[in-house]
Image (tube, rainbow, N blue to C red):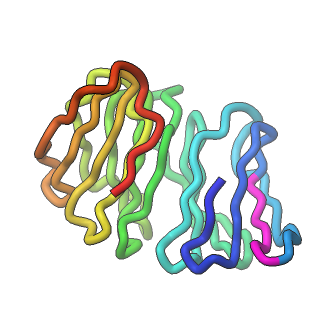
Amino acid sequence: VAYSPDGKRIATGSADGSLRIWDAATGVRLMTVYAHKKGWYGALAFSPDSTRIVSGNRDTMKVWDVNSGTELLTIQGHQSSAPWRRIAFSPDGKLIVSGSDDKTIKAWDAETGAKMRTFTGHESLVACVSYSPDGSRLVSGDSDGIIKIWDAVTGAEIRTLTGHTTHIAEVIF
Protein backbone atom coordinates (compact mmCIF):
# COMPACT_ATOMS: atom_id res chain seq x y z
CA VAL A 1 0.00 0.00 0.00
CA ALA A 2 1.28 3.49 -0.83
CA TYR A 3 -0.23 6.95 -0.34
CA SER A 4 0.60 9.60 -2.94
CA PRO A 5 2.55 12.63 -1.64
CA ASP A 6 -0.19 14.97 -2.85
CA GLY A 7 -2.72 13.02 -0.76
CA LYS A 8 -5.05 12.34 -3.69
CA ARG A 9 -4.42 8.64 -4.40
CA ILE A 10 -3.81 5.33 -2.72
CA ALA A 11 -2.10 2.47 -4.53
CA THR A 12 -2.48 -1.18 -3.63
CA GLY A 13 -0.72 -4.26 -4.95
CA SER A 14 -2.06 -7.78 -4.67
CA ALA A 15 -0.86 -11.36 -5.08
CA ASP A 16 -3.17 -11.58 -8.13
CA GLY A 17 -0.62 -9.36 -9.92
CA SER A 18 -2.82 -6.28 -9.94
CA LEU A 19 -1.89 -2.70 -9.14
CA ARG A 20 -4.93 -0.58 -8.29
CA ILE A 21 -5.11 3.18 -7.88
CA TRP A 22 -7.89 4.59 -5.71
CA ASP A 23 -9.22 8.11 -5.12
CA ALA A 24 -8.25 8.79 -1.49
CA ALA A 25 -11.21 11.10 -0.85
CA THR A 26 -14.01 9.02 -2.37
CA GLY A 27 -12.67 5.46 -2.37
CA VAL A 28 -13.47 5.12 -6.08
CA ARG A 29 -11.11 2.82 -7.97
CA LEU A 30 -9.50 4.92 -10.70
CA MET A 31 -7.49 2.24 -12.46
CA THR A 32 -6.38 -1.37 -12.43
CA VAL A 33 -3.36 -2.71 -14.28
CA TYR A 34 -2.01 -6.22 -14.15
CA ALA A 35 1.50 -5.14 -13.34
CA HIS A 36 3.18 -8.43 -12.57
CA LYS A 37 2.73 -12.16 -12.75
CA LYS A 38 0.53 -13.65 -10.08
CA GLY A 39 2.32 -14.38 -6.86
CA TRP A 40 4.32 -12.43 -4.34
CA TYR A 41 3.95 -8.63 -4.66
CA GLY A 42 6.84 -6.82 -3.10
CA ALA A 43 6.82 -3.05 -3.13
CA LEU A 44 5.10 0.16 -4.21
CA ALA A 45 6.20 3.80 -4.12
CA PHE A 46 4.89 7.05 -5.60
CA SER A 47 7.18 9.62 -7.17
CA PRO A 48 7.50 12.86 -5.16
CA ASP A 49 5.31 14.71 -7.67
CA SER A 50 2.65 11.94 -7.49
CA THR A 51 2.65 11.41 -11.29
CA ARG A 52 4.40 8.01 -11.35
CA ILE A 53 4.30 4.87 -9.29
CA VAL A 54 6.84 2.08 -9.17
CA SER A 55 5.93 -1.52 -8.40
CA GLY A 56 8.16 -4.49 -7.79
CA ASN A 57 7.84 -8.24 -7.41
CA ARG A 58 10.04 -11.32 -7.78
CA ASP A 59 11.46 -10.56 -11.20
CA THR A 60 10.88 -6.96 -12.27
CA MET A 61 10.28 -3.41 -11.19
CA LYS A 62 7.92 -1.32 -13.32
CA VAL A 63 7.25 2.41 -13.47
CA TRP A 64 3.72 3.53 -14.36
CA ASP A 65 2.03 6.79 -15.31
CA VAL A 66 -0.55 7.31 -12.55
CA ASN A 67 -3.04 9.14 -14.76
CA SER A 68 -3.08 6.88 -17.81
CA GLY A 69 -1.90 3.53 -16.43
CA THR A 70 0.76 3.41 -19.13
CA GLU A 71 3.84 1.36 -18.33
CA LEU A 72 6.77 3.73 -18.70
CA LEU A 73 9.66 1.45 -17.79
CA THR A 74 10.54 -2.13 -16.86
CA ILE A 75 13.69 -2.76 -14.86
CA GLN A 76 15.44 -6.04 -14.16
CA GLY A 77 18.69 -6.22 -12.28
CA HIS A 78 18.65 -7.91 -8.91
CA GLN A 79 19.76 -11.53 -8.94
CA SER A 80 17.36 -14.01 -10.50
CA SER A 81 14.36 -14.81 -8.27
CA ALA A 82 15.48 -12.36 -5.57
CA PRO A 83 12.34 -10.40 -4.67
CA TRP A 84 12.34 -6.62 -4.69
CA ARG A 85 11.54 -6.03 -1.02
CA ARG A 86 11.28 -2.25 -0.85
CA ILE A 87 11.41 0.58 -3.37
CA ALA A 88 11.78 4.34 -2.86
CA PHE A 89 12.06 7.38 -5.12
CA SER A 90 14.72 9.96 -4.32
CA PRO A 91 13.25 13.25 -3.06
CA ASP A 92 13.94 14.88 -6.47
CA GLY A 93 12.32 11.95 -8.33
CA LYS A 94 15.42 11.29 -10.45
CA LEU A 95 16.42 7.97 -8.87
CA ILE A 96 14.70 4.87 -7.57
CA VAL A 97 16.37 2.62 -5.01
CA SER A 98 15.46 -1.00 -4.40
CA GLY A 99 16.37 -3.44 -1.67
CA SER A 100 16.33 -7.15 -2.38
CA ASP A 101 16.89 -10.69 -1.14
CA ASP A 102 20.22 -10.63 -3.00
CA LYS A 103 21.57 -8.54 -0.06
CA THR A 104 22.06 -5.40 -2.16
CA ILE A 105 20.52 -2.01 -2.69
CA LYS A 106 20.55 -0.69 -6.24
CA ALA A 107 19.97 2.84 -7.46
CA TRP A 108 18.31 3.27 -10.87
CA ASP A 109 17.75 6.25 -13.15
CA ALA A 110 14.00 6.84 -12.89
CA GLU A 111 13.70 7.93 -16.55
CA THR A 112 15.88 5.37 -18.34
CA GLY A 113 16.11 2.45 -15.90
CA ALA A 114 19.91 2.48 -16.08
CA LYS A 115 21.61 1.10 -12.98
CA MET A 116 23.55 3.96 -11.40
CA ARG A 117 25.17 2.17 -8.44
CA THR A 118 25.02 -0.85 -6.17
CA PHE A 119 25.29 -0.62 -2.40
CA THR A 120 26.84 -3.73 -0.81
CA GLY A 121 27.52 -4.57 2.81
CA HIS A 122 24.45 -6.32 4.17
CA GLU A 123 24.89 -9.99 4.99
CA SER A 124 21.20 -10.86 4.72
CA LEU A 125 18.21 -9.75 2.63
CA VAL A 126 17.59 -6.01 2.50
CA ALA A 127 14.05 -5.66 3.81
CA CYS A 128 13.61 -1.89 3.71
CA VAL A 129 15.21 1.28 2.38
CA SER A 130 14.46 4.99 2.65
CA TYR A 131 16.01 8.30 1.52
CA SER A 132 16.79 11.20 3.81
CA PRO A 133 14.59 14.25 3.05
CA ASP A 134 17.50 16.01 1.29
CA GLY A 135 18.42 12.90 -0.72
CA SER A 136 22.01 12.82 0.52
CA ARG A 137 21.70 9.61 2.54
CA LEU A 138 19.93 6.27 2.50
CA VAL A 139 19.00 4.08 5.42
CA SER A 140 18.44 0.34 5.02
CA GLY A 141 17.46 -2.54 7.27
CA ASP A 142 18.01 -6.24 6.84
CA SER A 143 16.65 -9.56 8.07
CA ASP A 144 19.44 -9.93 10.64
CA GLY A 145 18.39 -6.75 12.46
CA ILE A 146 21.20 -4.59 11.05
CA ILE A 147 20.60 -0.99 9.95
CA LYS A 148 23.03 0.80 7.64
CA ILE A 149 23.30 4.46 6.68
CA TRP A 150 24.81 5.19 3.26
CA ASP A 151 26.04 8.16 1.28
CA ALA A 152 23.43 8.18 -1.49
CA VAL A 153 25.78 9.80 -4.01
CA THR A 154 28.92 7.72 -3.58
CA GLY A 155 27.42 4.50 -2.20
CA ALA A 156 29.82 4.55 0.74
CA GLU A 157 28.62 3.04 3.99
CA ILE A 158 28.57 5.76 6.66
CA ARG A 159 27.44 3.86 9.74
CA THR A 160 26.07 0.54 10.96
CA LEU A 161 23.48 0.48 13.74
CA THR A 162 22.97 -2.65 15.81
CA GLY A 163 20.74 -3.64 18.68
CA HIS A 164 17.73 -5.31 17.08
CA THR A 165 17.81 -9.09 17.29
CA THR A 166 15.71 -9.91 14.25
CA HIS A 167 14.26 -8.66 10.95
CA ILE A 168 13.97 -4.88 10.46
CA ALA A 169 10.45 -4.29 9.14
CA GLU A 170 10.72 -0.59 8.29
CA VAL A 171 13.17 2.31 8.25
CA ILE A 172 12.40 5.95 7.61
CA PHE A 173 14.27 9.25 7.85
> In this view of the protein, which residue sits in the foreground, 123 or 161?
161
Q: Position of residue 134 (x, y in %)?
A: 26, 71
Say whether residue 24 is magenta.
yes
Residue 100, quarter of the rendered image: top left
Q: Nearest the camera: 73 or 52?
A: 52
| Residue closest to the far front | 163
Residue 5 or residue 163, whichever sits in front: 163
Q: Quadrant of residue 96?
A: bottom left
Q: Quadrant of the C terminus?
A: bottom left
**Residue 118: horizontal and vertical position, in percent?**
26, 44
Give the total number of marks visible in the rendering: 0
Q: At which x and y percent is residue 150?
A: 19, 48
Residue drawn at x 75%, y 72% is: 24
Question: Which of 5 and 35 lies nearest the eye of the viewer?
Answer: 5
Q: What residue is shown at x 70% (from left), y 72% (from top)?
A: 9
Position of residue 2 in the picture relative to residue 38 (left or right): left
What residue sits 22% from the left and 58% below the top? 137
Q: What span is colored magenta in the figure?
A: 19-25
| 21 inside magenta stretch | yes
Left or right for 45, reference 141:
right
**Residue at (56% x, 59% y) in the render:** 54
Q: Magenta stretch mostly in which secondary structure?
A: strand
Residue 161, by quadrant, is top left
- Vertical relation: 61 (above or below) 66: above
Return the x and y of residue 166 as percentages of the image width and height: 40, 21
Q: In the visual, does 11 lie left or right of 143?
A: right
